[in-house]
Amino acid sequence: MSGYTNRVILLEFPDLGDRVSVLLRNPRLLPPGEITPDDVALGPDGQPTDPQAAQQAMYKVIANIIAAWHVYDASSTGQAVHVNLDADDLDAQLAALEAAEQVRLTDITPENVARLPMAIINRIGEELGRVADPS
């Protein structure tokens, strides 16, 4: 069979949970237009004038290179439970926080990428960074 090898990269996150993984289209094999963020205005210091717009542009790139995933909404983890560290029933509160419902993300969209844990976003960023510095 001819063509490129290693067309996908499986990222697994056993420290985050069972079966938490992201399957990426190998960014080193993609054309530049698919991994280049939308233009974002830069200030005189070279930094984005709107950091939120820059972040959204990057989430769009990340969503574009994800082929499949088995991940959960990090923004929903424990929102329904607030722990009061001064309370006498701290163990019960911590147990309730751990038992809080976690929502599995199914659609691969920039909005859902924004809901990923930083550990996953950073790891995908490392793969994107290897395009510029393959060492």
Image: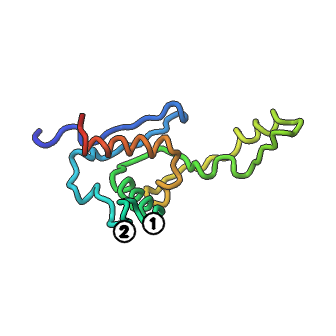
Q: Which residue is mark 2?
A: 41
Q: In the rendered picture of this protein, how many numbered marks are placed on residues?
A: 2
Type of residue at label 1? Asp
Disc marking residue 50 = 1
Q: Image height check: is 57 above or below 123?
A: below
Disc marking residue 61 = none
Where is the C terminus found, in terms of image quarters? Answer: top left
Cα distance between the residues tagged 1 and 2: 7 Å
Left or right side of 51 for 32 = left
The crowd level at tag 1 (other Cα within 10 Å; few <14, some 14-19, many 20+) is: few
Task: Give the residue displayed 36% in from the left and 68% down from the top.
Answer: 41
Query: Please, which residue is most extreme toward the left here?
Result: 2
Given residues 47 and 19, the one toward you in this image is 47
Query: Please, which residue is most extreme toward the right here?
Result: 88
Quadrant location of residue 7? top left
Q: Image height check: is 82 above or below 45?
A: above
Task: Give the residue displayed 58% in from the left and 48% down from the top.
Answer: 74
Task: Give the residue displayed 41% in from the left and 43% down from the top.
Answer: 22
Residue 118 on image: x %, y %? 50, 45
Where is the N terminus found, in terms of image quarters? Answer: top left
